[in-house]
Image (cartoon, rainbow, N blue to C red):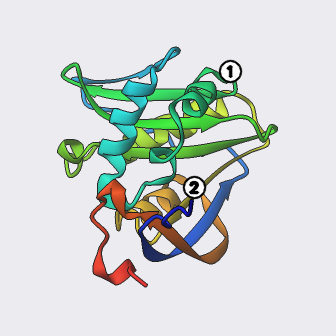
Amino acid sequence: MSLMPEAVIRVGVTVTFLRMEARPFAMAPDLPDNAEVVQERQCSVERYRFLYNTVGNDYVWWLRRILPDNQLAALLRDPRVAIHVLHVDGEPAGFYELDRSGWPAVNLSYFGLLPTAIGHGMGFAFLRHAVDTAWAMRPRMVSVNTCSADHPRALPTYLRAGFRPVRQVWEEWNVPSRLGLPIPPALRI
C-alpha cells in the first residue's frame, strides 16, 4: 500500500533572529484602560489553537497547526512555557508565549494581535509587556525571531523595543495545503 504525498505550498521567507542582552531603559507605554494581560496558567489546547490560528492566519503560522494535540498539550503543561493573553473589554485581543527551555535565555516564541486589535496603537505597549515579563524572570538575554511572512511592522517594532538582529537566514517551507492558509503570492516559490 503506497501513501500519496501530502500536497504542500512551497513558501520562501527570510527569517531574522534577534536578541536583547539588557532590559530596556525607557519606560514601557501603558496599555489602554480597557486592556489587561493575563497569564493563562492552564491554557487548553482548544484555547491555544484559537489564539495561534487567529493571530497567525494571515502570517503563515503553520507549525503549531500540524502539531498533534497530545504534543501541544505537553508543551502547554511545561512549566518553562508561559502563555499570556491580552484582553480588551474582556475579549481576547492577542497573545504571547515565553519559553525558558533555553535558560538562561528566554525566547519570545510567539507574539501577535488578533486582526480586530491591529491598528489601535496597542502593539508596542503589548510587546513591551512581553519584554518586561521576560526580563522579570532574570535571564541573561531575551530572543525572538520574525520573518518576511509576518506583519510588515513586526521587525521595526522589535527593533524599537530594543532587540538587535543577530543573523538572517533564507528558509523554504512546505506548508500543507490542507491548512487552507492564505499564502501571499510574493512568498510562493
Q: Which mark is residue 175?
A: none
In the depicted view, which residue is nearer to us: 22 or 107? 107
Residue 25 shows in the view: no
**Residue reaching furthest to the top:** 42
| Nearest to N terminus: mark 1 or mark 2 | 1
In the depicted view, which residue is nearer to us: 3 or 74? 3
Relative side of 47 to 80, left or right: left
Residue 181 shows in the view: yes
Relative side of 53 to 62, left or right: left
Q: Secondary structure at mark 2?
A: loop
How crowded pointer 1 is (Cα within 10 Å; few <14, some 14-19, many 20+) is rated as few
Q: Which mark is residue 79?
A: 1
How far apart marks 1 and 2 lie (CA) works out to 27 Å
Report the residue at 45% width, 76% height from top: 10
Task: Name which residue type carries label 1.
Answer: Pro
Q: Quadrant of the C terminus?
A: bottom left
